[in-house]
Image (spheres, rainbow, N blue to C red):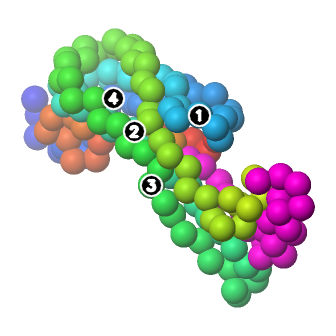
Amino acid sequence: MSFFGKIKQGLGIGTASLELDIPQTFSRNASEFAGKVVLTGKSAQKVKSITFKMTEHYTTGTGENRTTKEYKLGELCLNQPFDLAADERREIEFKLPFSLKLSSTQALAEKGGVLGAIGKVASITSNEKSTYQIHASADLEGVALDPNDVRTV
């Protein structure tokens, strides 16, 4: 491999691409998120592991008082190394276990009845909003910038 080829490989240029193939939504009552990741080799690579993570971005307030916190809801690491040939396309299914963390107003809103109504009003007045993301990253041997993908569900 040429000098420039080694530099490109080290930076992850022309090595492999990773794409999440997941549903647009998920059930808040579920305990795992199912999907698949598609790896495509641009050159021969050794995949050491694939890591999946689910996060919640919880936002409250408005304007300058707006704050966002990130919570890790679940993580899965597939430590089964394999070789990925050039131009090979490999689909790998996964089931990512997760546990939602509810704020006190969200928990109250889910109770239903009068308490649920109070929780919903409190949630609206504090301008609470949660967005969820699935992150996937493949650890390639000898590559500094590994391929990854992030999707909002």
Q: Position of residue 127 (x, y in %)?
A: 78, 72
Is there CB contact under 8 Å for labels 4 and 2?
no
77 over 83 or under it: above or below: below
Quadrant of residue 82 within the rendered picture: top left
Give the CA distance from mark 1 to mark 2: 17 Å
The first of marks 3 and 2 along the sequence is 2
Name the quadrant of the C terminus.
top right
Q: Is residue 135 left or right of residue 50?
A: right
Q: Position of residue 102 (x, y in %)?
A: 61, 59
Residue occupied by mark 3: 72
Q: Earlier in the sequence, mark 3 or mark 1?
A: 1
The residue stretch that appears in magenta:
111-133
Q: In which image quadrant can residue 64 be found?
A: bottom right
Residue under label 2: 52
Q: Residues within 10 Å of mark 1 (few under 14, many from 20)?
A: few
Q: Which residue is situated farthest in the front direction here?
A: 114
For mark 4, give the secondary structure.
Answer: strand
Quarter the N terminus occupies: top left
